[in-house]
């Protein structure tokens, strides 16, 4: 069992190193898709490597453990990659240290931040929306995502959010 933990750790760290190298060379246009490609590639390499030295149960354990780590990281990456108002506020308070951030400074920070503009550019970059006749429209991918989230919200009984 310990060997599978080591193997998962090595594969996961190798994927992270590959991501850092790729991001340093050239930042990809679609971060999410590139992360999926990187982590799926290392998943397949790990399965192939395990099949050479162990039976299929180790491969199955590898897929489960590595999959959880990879999907958790990809989800976490979206938090640090985006410029949400919450993250901007937390980082500003952190920079201020023990003295904290005054309410006036918070108001100034939030008035400077182009929260909506940032989100629109990210949606366009990820090919979820496009402009036509001076209006924003959902792409096919955006429509699929909207339906998926709408269904999830209905199942959970969440009426409003975002």
Image: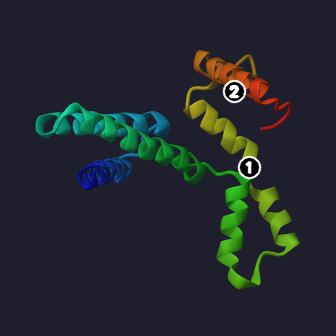
Viewer-proximal residue, 119 or 3? 3
For label 1, count other residues whose C-alpha is less than 10 Å away and answer few (under 14), some (14-19) or many (20+): few
Tag 1, which secondary structure?
Answer: loop
Residue at image x 37%, y 34%? 37
Q: How many tags in the picture?
A: 2
Which is closer to the viewer, label 2 or label 1?
A: 2
User: Which x, y percent locates residue 119?
Assistant: 68, 40
Residue under numbered circle 2: 149
Instruction: Using the numbered discs, state the Cα–Cα distance from disc 2 to disc 1 in whole angstroms.
Output: 25 Å
x and y percentages locating residue 124 in the rendered image: 61, 31
Residue at 68% in and 36% down:
120
Which quadrant, please, contains the C terminus? top right
Q: Residue at x 73, y 48 (%)?
A: 115
Query: Which residue is outermost to the left?
Result: 52
Query: Which residue lies under the disc numbered 1?
Result: 114
Where is residue 138? Give x, y as percent: 67, 20
**In the image, residue 109 lies at what x, y percent?**
77, 63
78 or 10, which lies in front? 10
- Give the side of residue 122 with respect to residue 92, left or right: left
Tell me which residue sits at (82%, 29%) in the image. Answer: 157
The image quadrant that residue 148 belongs to is top right
Could you say which quadrant of the image residue 107 lies in? bottom right
């Amino acid at each position: 069992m310990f060997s599978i933990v080591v193997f998962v750790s090595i594969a996961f760290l190798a994927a992270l190193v590959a991501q850092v190298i790729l991001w340093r060379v050239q930042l990809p246009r679609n971060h999410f898709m590139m992360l999926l490609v990187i982590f799926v590639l290392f998943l397949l390499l790990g399965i192939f490597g395990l099949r050479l030295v162990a039976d299929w149960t180790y491969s199955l354990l590898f897929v489960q453990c590595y999959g959880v780590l990879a999907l958790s990281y990809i989800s976490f990456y979206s938090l640090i990659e985006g410029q949400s108002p919450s993250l901007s506020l937390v980082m500003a308070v952190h920079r201020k240290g023990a003295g904290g951030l005054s309410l006036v400074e918070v108001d100034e920070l939030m008035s400077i931040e182009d929260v909506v503009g940032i989100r629109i550019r990210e949606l366009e970059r990820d090919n979820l929306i496009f402009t036509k006749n001076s209006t924003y429209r959902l792409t096919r991918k955006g429509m699929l995502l909207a339906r998926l989230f709408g269904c999830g919200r209905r199942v959970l009984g969440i009426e409003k959010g975002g």
